[in-house]
Amino acid sequence: MGLNLSFDAALRNEGAPHVSPIGVHRASTFYGLCAAHDDQLFKQIDLPGAAIDSEGALLYLYRALCHEMYKKEWSIETSRLLQAELGFHGDHAALALGSAWAVMSLMEFLERCESSLVSHDYSQVGYAAFVSESAPYLVASSVWFPDRDFHGRQLQQLPQVDHVPGCIAAFALPHQGKSLVLLVWHRDTQWCTDLMLHSLATAFAPEAMGAALVRMIMCTSENVFFRPSWWAGRSESDRRLYQSFWRESANLHNPVSPTYLRAIDGFELEFEVAYVEQLPTRAAKGSR
């Protein structure tokens, strides 16, 4: 199960995504790289039970950046097609401009990651792995430029062109029979991750922070997939809450709430963090 973001679905639902069955092959395939290069480059992190380390974190970050670049370019094209098919103009033109800014910002981080991969310099990446004993039920990845923290306080004004924006990659993964939330960032935006994690720790009790992270990923990632039996076991109100969040997010006339990271706080989740593995980086001088 996952968000259906196909062009046909967008036409049927007036641009709004919704949850529907998605085959494993389709959900796990990324068309931005050929199969041979994808297998060769990401072999380490695709191995069952692969350990989380700085090299693996860099590979996760790089693949997520590639995927997000692919999706943003697709978003620009979809906006153009929706304008042609449904007669949308100003709003979708603005969305395309925002996606174009995101593509340029993503390219900045892609080039930095590629430089690190070529030189085998993994010191440029930091990560925090939150491990839960709960059985895996969700797989997701996202890269986003956080403009607000968990309290709704502004982190940065977007879009920005005078310096590198804060950027965080977030993943929900199965890990050695357990569940894992992985945050990865480039050292130049360590400041952004520090502020996000501080707001997480002050907004939630320790036993609730894991579920808050999963809900955050559900609110920021379009690339999210659920185990069908898990989704079917959610209450009707939970399913309605999640899908209504994405419908409202797709409505360009709705202002984004400052507390959007907590928009589905009422969604019941089991994800109590058993332990955290963390490798912070030293932020580059004057990086913000």
Image (tube, grey):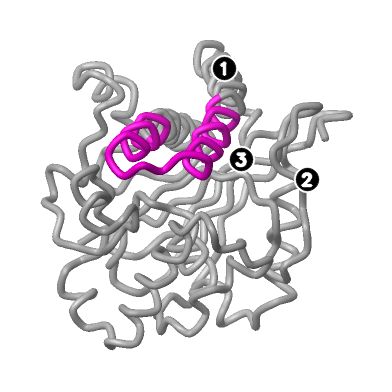
Closer to the camera, 34 or 124? 34
Q: Which residue was labeled with disc 3?
A: 185
Label disc, if present, on residue 111 of the rendered structure: 1
Secondary element at image label 3: strand
Q: Which residue appears at 24% of the width and 50% of the height? A: 11
| Nearer-N-terminus badge (1/2) | 1
Q: Which residues are magenta?
A: 75-103
Q: Is residue 200 above or below residue 106?
A: below
Amino acid type shown at disc 2 = Trp
Q: Earlier in the sequence, mark 2 or mark 3?
A: 3
Tag 3: amino acid: Trp
Query: Horizontal placement of 168 versus 66: left or right?
Result: right
Callout 1, which amino acid? Glu
Residue located 33% across and 22% down the image: 41
**Mark 1: few/some/many CA within 10 Å (<14, 14-19, 20+):** few
State the SS at label 2. helix
> As drawn, which residue projects farthest toward the front?
87
Q: Are dots 2 and 3 in contact, CB under 8 Å? A: no
Whichever of labels 3 and 1 marks the residue nearer the N terminus, that label is 1
Residue at image mark 2: 191
Viewer-closest of 159 and 13: 13
Asked whether residue 90 is drawn in magenta, I would say: yes
Real-space Cα distance between discs 2 and 3? 10 Å
Left or right side of 1 for 60: right
